[in-house]
Image: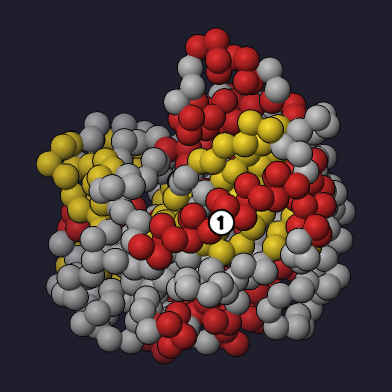
C-alpha cells in the first residue's frame, strides 16, 4: 500500500502477517466479499528487483535479534523466518511435500507426542486445491502415502547435481527415491490476480528470492489474488500491541512511517509465526488461560551431510531440493521418522555453514572453498516432539522499539538425538558410495513450530481445531504456532491448507453473526 494512501477503515477482518499462514486466508476472505486488510512488518520485494546475490537479498529475512537458550540453541535470522510481503515464502525453497496421515496421529501410534485434532481427509481437498493453484511440479506417481486424487499440475523440475548423485547412491542400497514436489513451475502458467508466471530458469538462488515469479511465493500467488479482490496490504507496518475492549479483540497498534497507528476490525487473525505470534500474545497477557502460549516450541531435526566429488556439479544451479525419499518415514526404535532431500547450495550460504559446522577459518577455509563447485549435500527433515523444556518467553532485554526480546529455549530430546545419529550415518554411507571426500555434517534444527497449540480442550490448547482462540472473542490464529506436532515433512503446504480451512470456518462464523 502506498504510504500516501489512507489506512483502511471499518474492516471485517485484520490479518497480521502475509506468509503461508496469512496470505491464503486473506485471499479467501477477500474473494468472499469481506472487507479485509493485512499488516506486514516487511516491505515489498517485486520479482524484477530480486538480484542473484545472497548478500543483497538479506532484507528477505527477519533479522531482529531473538535470544536463544538451551542445549541446542536455535540460530534464527536467515535460518528460520522471513520479512517482506509474502513472509518466509520469499526465501523458502518451494519444497512442498504433503504430510502423511499417520503424521497427525503420533500419540495414537507411539503413546507420546500429540495427535492433531483433525483428520487427513479434512486436509486432503485443500492439498489438492493448493497444488493446482500454486502450480506444484511433481512426479506422475509418488511412491509414498495415499493414492492421489489429483495429479500434480506440472511435471517435475530437472534434477541438479546433488539429486543425481543421491539417486545413484540410494539405488545401490535399494532405497526408493522420487523427484520432489516443488512449488516452482516447470511450465509457465497464468496466475489469477498476477498474470503470467514464467518457467523456472534453474537459477538455483531460490532462497534469495525468485526473479521470474516461477516460485510460488505468496506475493505472486495468494496476495496478488487478494488485492485483485480488494484486500489492502500495509507493508512496513510493525505490530507492537494487540488491542482488546470489553473482552473482545478490537485491532492492533503498529509502527508505520515512523508513527504509531491503530487499525480496528471486528475480527483479528494473528499469522505472525511461531515466534512473533506468542510474543504479541504474551506482551498483552492475552488468550493464555491455559498457560500454553509460548509452550511446546518445536524445530525439525535437520542434520545435513556434505561432501565433494570429482564431477563439476555447480551446486548453485537447479531447484535446491530436487529429489526426495520417504523410505525413512518410520524406523524401528524411533518415534516418527524423517525424509531425505538432496541439496543445492548458494556460495555464501555454503561458506558460512562450513565455517560454523567445522570451525575452519583462514587459509584452510579458503582452500576448502576452492572445491565449492564440486559440493553436494543431503538434508533430512525429521519429527521433533513437543517438550515442556522447549518454550518461548519474554526476556528482560528490550529491542530497538523498547519491547522485550523473545527468548527461545530449545534442547533436543533423546528421540531427536537418536534420529540425528541415524540420519547422519545413512547420509555418510550414501555419500561414501559415490566416492565423496571431505564429508562433514552440520547438526541443525529447522523451522519454528508450536507455541500456540490447537486442540479441543481449552485447558491444554490455545485455539480450537479451526484456529479460533478459546478464551478471547474475535481472535483467530493461523500460522505454524498452532501445530500440535511437527510432522516429518516441511510445513509450508500444510500451513497453507490450514489457512484455507480457517478461512472457510471464519467466513461461516461471520455469516452467522451478520
Q: Residue at x 78, y 43 (%)?
A: 434
Q: Find numbered disc 1 in the image and state the secondary structure of the residue it sits on.
A: helix
Q: Nearer the viewer, residue 237 or 412?
A: 412
Q: Is residue 284 above or below residue 82?
A: below
Q: Is residue 372 left or right of residue 310?
A: left
Q: Nearer the viewer, residue 103 or 219?
A: 103
Q: Position of residue 393 (x, y in %)?
A: 20, 53
Q: Position of residue 196 (x, y in %)?
A: 81, 50
Q: Is residue 237 left or right of residue 103?
A: left
Report which residue position mark 1 lands on.
Answer: 423
Q: Nearer the viewer, residue 124 or 146?
A: 146
Q: Residues within 10 Å of mark 1 (few under 14, many from 20)?
A: many
Q: Residue at x 45, y 26 (%)?
A: 359
Q: Is residue 50 above or below residue 403?
A: above
Is residue 469 among what the camera can see? no
Q: For residue 171, what is the image quadrant? A: bottom right
The extreme left residue here reads 396
In the rendered image, the quadrant that contains the C terminus is: bottom left
Q: Is residue 53 above or below residue 502?
A: above
Q: Is residue 108 above or below residue 506?
A: below
Q: Residue at x 55, y 51 (%)?
A: 424
Q: Residue at x 57, y 31 (%)?
A: 349
Q: Position of residue 154 (x, y in %)?
A: 84, 62
Colouring used for the render: secondary structure
Amino acid at each position: 500500500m502506498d504510504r500516501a494512501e489512507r489506512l483502511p477503515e471499518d474492516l471485517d477482518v485484520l490479518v497480521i502477517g502475509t506468509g503461508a499462514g496469512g496470505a491464503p486466508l486473506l485471499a479467501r476472505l477477500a474473494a468472499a466479499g469481506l472487507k479485509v486488510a493485512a499488516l506486514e512488518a516487511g516491505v515489498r520485494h517485486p520479482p524484477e528487483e530480486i538480484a542473484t546475490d545472497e548478500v543483497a537479498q538479506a532484507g528477505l529475512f527477519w533479522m531482529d535479534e531473538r535470544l536463544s537458550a538451551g542445549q541446542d540453541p536455535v540460530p534464527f535470522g536467515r535460518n528460520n523466518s522471513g520479512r517482506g510481503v509474502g513472509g518466509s515464502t520469499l526465501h523458502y525453497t518451494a519444497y512442498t511435500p504433503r504430510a502423511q496421515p499417520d503424521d497427525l496421529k503420533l500419540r495414537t501410534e507411539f503413546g507420546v507426542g500429540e495427535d492433531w485434532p483433525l483428520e487427513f481427509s479434512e486436509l486432503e481437498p485443500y492439498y489438492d486445491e493448493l497444488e493446482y493453484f500454486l502450480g506444484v511440479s511433481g512426479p506422475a506417481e509418488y511412491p509414498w502415502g495415499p493414492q492421489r486424487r489429483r495429479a500434480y499440475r506440472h511435471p517435475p523440475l530437472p534434477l541438479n547435481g546433488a539429486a543425481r548423485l543421491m539417486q545413484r547412491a540410494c539405488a545401490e542400497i535399494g532405497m526408493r527415491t522420487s523427484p520432489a514436489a516443488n512449488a516452482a513451475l516447470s511450465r509457465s502458467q497464468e496466475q489469477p490476480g498476477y498474470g503470467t508466471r514464467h518457467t523456472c530458469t534453474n537459477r538455483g538462488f531460490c532462497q534469495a528470492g525468485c526473479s521470474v515469479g516461477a516460485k510460488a511465493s505468496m506475493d505472486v500467488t495468494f496476495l496478488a489474488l487478494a488485492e485483485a479482490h480488494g484486500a489492502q496490504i500495509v507493508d512496513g507496518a510493525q505490530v507492537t500491541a494487540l488491542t482488546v475492549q470489553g473482552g473482545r479483540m478490537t485491532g492492533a497498534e503498529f509502527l508505520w512511517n515512523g508513527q504509531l497507528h491503530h487499525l480496528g476490525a471486528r475480527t483479528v487473525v494473528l499469522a505472525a509465526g511461531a515466534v512473533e505470534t506468542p510474543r504479541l500474545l504474551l506482551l498483552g497477557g492475552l488468550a493464555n488461560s491455559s498457560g500454553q502460549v509460548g509452550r511446546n516450541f518445536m524445530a525439525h531435526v535437520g542434520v545435513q551431510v556434505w561432501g565433494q566429488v570429482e564431477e563439476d556439479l555447480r551446486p548453485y544451479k537447479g531447484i535446491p531440493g530436487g529429489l526426495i525419499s520417504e523410505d525413512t518415514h518410520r524406523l524401528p526404535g524411533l518415534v516418527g521418522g524423517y525424509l531425505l532431500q538432496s541439496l543445492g547450495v548458494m556460495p555464501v550460504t555454503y561458506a558460512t555453514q562450513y565455517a560454523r559446522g567445522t570451525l575452519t577459518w583462514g587459509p584452510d577455509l579458503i582452500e576448502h572453498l576452492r572445491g565449492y563447485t564440486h559440493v553436494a549435500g543431503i538434508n533430512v527433515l525429521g519429527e521433533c516432539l513437543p517438550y515442556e523444556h522447549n518454550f518461548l518467553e519474554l526476556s528482560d532485554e528490550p529491542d530497538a522499539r523498547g519491547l522485550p526480546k523473545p527468548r527461545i529455549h530449545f534442547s533436543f530430546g533423546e528421540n531427536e538425538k537418536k534420529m540425528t545419529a541415524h540420519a547422519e550415518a545413512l547420509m555418510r554411507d550414501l555419500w561414501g558410495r559415490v566416492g565423496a571426500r571431505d564429508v562433514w555434517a552440520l547438526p541443525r534444527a529447522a523451522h519454528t513450530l508450536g507455541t500456540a497449540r490447537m486442540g479441543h480442550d481449552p485447558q491444554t490448547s490455545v485455539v480450537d481445531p479451526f484456529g479460533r482462540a478459546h478464551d478471547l472473542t474475535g481472535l483467530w490464529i493461523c500460522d505454524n504456532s498452532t501445530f500440535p506436532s511437527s510432522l516429518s515433512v516441511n510445513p509450508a503446504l500444510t500451513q497453507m491448507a490450514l489457512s484455507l480451512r480457517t478461512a472457510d470456518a471464519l467466513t461461516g462464523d461471520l455469516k452467522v453473526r451478520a
